[in-house]
Image (spheres, rainbow, N blue to C red):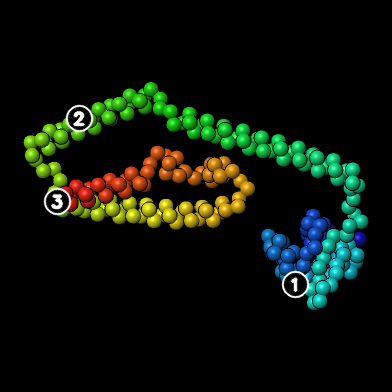
Amino acid sequence: MAPKSESVEGIVLSYVNEQNRPLNSQNVADALQKFKLKKTAIQKALDTLSDSGQISFKEYGKQKIYLARQDQFNILNSEELDQMKKANSKLQAELEVQKKAIVEVEAENRALQSNLTLEEIRTKESKLKAEVSLMEEKLEKLRTGIVLVKPEDKKATEEAYREKINQWRKRKRIFKELWDTLTDNSPKDLKEFKEELGIEFDEDVGVSLQLYGDLMTSRKRKRAS
């Protein structure tokens, strides 16, 4: 007689039949942790089910391997298997088409979101005009010989800038090593993989470590000359 579905034997039998693959007691115990069943209870249920012939088992040394009884499943013939393989291939192809469509839609959505509205353009224009006005005032002060930045503040800023560049370079190197390791021999398209993970490289957002590093180097050369 089949065990009740809510009993330990019922839960174990249902899992073994669903998996339909070789399992040991630890496999079953790990998978059924959500039911808060102890391993001893699961082992007892497996033994009871195998003794009653509701599941199969084989012994390999001291270990028992359990498997669902195969006579309860409908075994497909070669023609049915071929049809399933063809249907699976078709579904896989359709899935790839859908994935590409999703990527294109997401890219289009990002592009649309990056476009400014008329109100945002006017706000940005006002802000830029204010910044230009402020910079013109500073330029006029520089022309009159007024020192706007103290030497110690300038030195602190340059050191902070240099530290940020070094951190940028270090993290960029670490990321490249990780990225190369992850994508080595990967069958995935790297551009699509980047978009899937939401990763952007420096060049994707129009910045260059080399350019910012050169700015620091050029400052050193000017002071030396």
Does residue 43 appear anywhere in the picture? yes
Residue behind mark 2: 133
Does residue 14 appear anywhere in the picture? no
Residue behind mark 3: 151
Mark sitting on residue 40: 1
Mark sitting on residue 223: none
Disc nearer the start of the sequence (3/2): 2
Task: Give x and y (percent) for residue 116.
Answer: 40, 27
Q: Quadrant of residue 55?
A: bottom right
Q: Secondary structure at mark 1?
A: helix
Task: Give x and y (percent) for residue 81.
Answer: 86, 45
**Crowd band around label 3 with a 10 angstrom C-alpha radius: few (<14), some (14–19), many (20+):** few
Query: Given this view, does label 3 or label 2 mark the residue nearer the observer?
Result: 3
Question: Viewer-proximal residue, 219 or 32?
Answer: 219
Disc nearer the start of the sequence (2/1): 1
Residue in view at x 89 percent, y 46 percent: 78
Position of residue 65 relative to residue 182, above or below, is: below
Task: Give x and y (percent) for residue 96.
Answer: 67, 38
